[in-house]
Structure formats: structure tokens, C-alpha cells
Amino acid sequence: MTRIKENAGGVQIKVRVQPRASRNQVVGWMEESLKVRLTAPPVEGEANAALVRFLAEYFRLPRSAVSLITGSTSRQKIVQLVGISAAEVLRRVNS
């Protein structure tokens, strides 16, 4: 999978999560993944919930438009974003 995979509803992106960071932020592309730092700890799904909230806010989407496809127990995840194009994802990350 490349960085962004478009499908009927939106896009899927690979995300590399760094939990327990000093602040929530998108670092940028790291190889084929979008690196995201989160303040949440990686316990009991807290980091996953924080990732969904943060990406929804970052990409200006409703929370219901962001879902975790794979990687619920891993730092490497695949996230589905509904209602946004690959070009828009790239524009927001690279700006």
C-alpha cells in the first residue's frame, strides 16, 4: 500500500503512532506512513480513541468519518477517512 489509497468512500492511510508524546501533532510522512504523536497512553484503547479524535479535527471531518481499519494493538495502523480526497489529505499534511 502506498501512503494513501483511495476507495469509494474516501481514503485509507497508514499511520505510525507515537503515544505518550508531549503534545498531539502530525509530524509528517515517515517512509509510507503518516507519523502522529499523541499524548494518550497506549492502554485500554485510549491512544486509538485519541487518534480518531485528533485526525477528525486535523482533517476537519466528523468523528464518524474516521475509523481504525487495522492495528488496534500496534503502533502501525491503517485508518479510513470518509469524505476527503487523497489530494486534500496531501495538501493538509504538507502545508
Image (cartoon, helix red, strand yellow):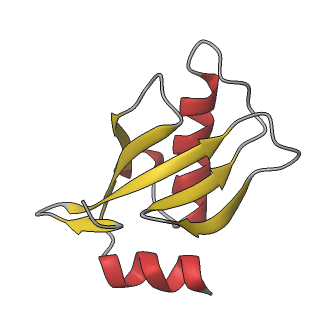
Q: Give the quarter of the figure containing the N terminus.
A: bottom left
Q: Residue furthest top?
A: 44
Name above or below for residue 34 compared with residue 28.
above
| In-front residue for pair 11/17 | 17
Left or right of 30 on screen, residue 61: left
Left or right side of 83 for 51: right
Q: Is residue 28 left or right of residue 90?
A: right
Q: Is residue 5 above or below residue 90?
A: above
Taking the spot 71% from the left edge, 35% from the top edge, the residue there is 19
Q: Residue 74 location in percent, x, y?
A: 48, 28
Question: Which residue shows up at 62% across the image and 30% down it?
Answer: 47
Please state the horizontal and vertical placement of residue 12, each as a whole percent of the image: 29, 57
Which picture quadrant has residue 89?
bottom left
Q: Residue at x 54, y 54 (%)?
A: 55
- For the residue pair 80 and 34, the one nearer the viewer reads as 34
User: Residue 75 appears at what percent x and percent y?
Assistant: 54, 35
* Residue under the point 75% across and 51% down: 24
Q: Residue furthest left?
A: 8
Q: Quadrant of residue 78?
A: top left
- Counting from the top left corner in percent of width and height, residue 73 is at 47, 22
Question: Which of the image's four quarters has the C terminus?
Answer: bottom right
Q: Looking at the image, how many numbered discs can be counted on the residues?
A: 0
Residue situated furthest front in the rendering: 31
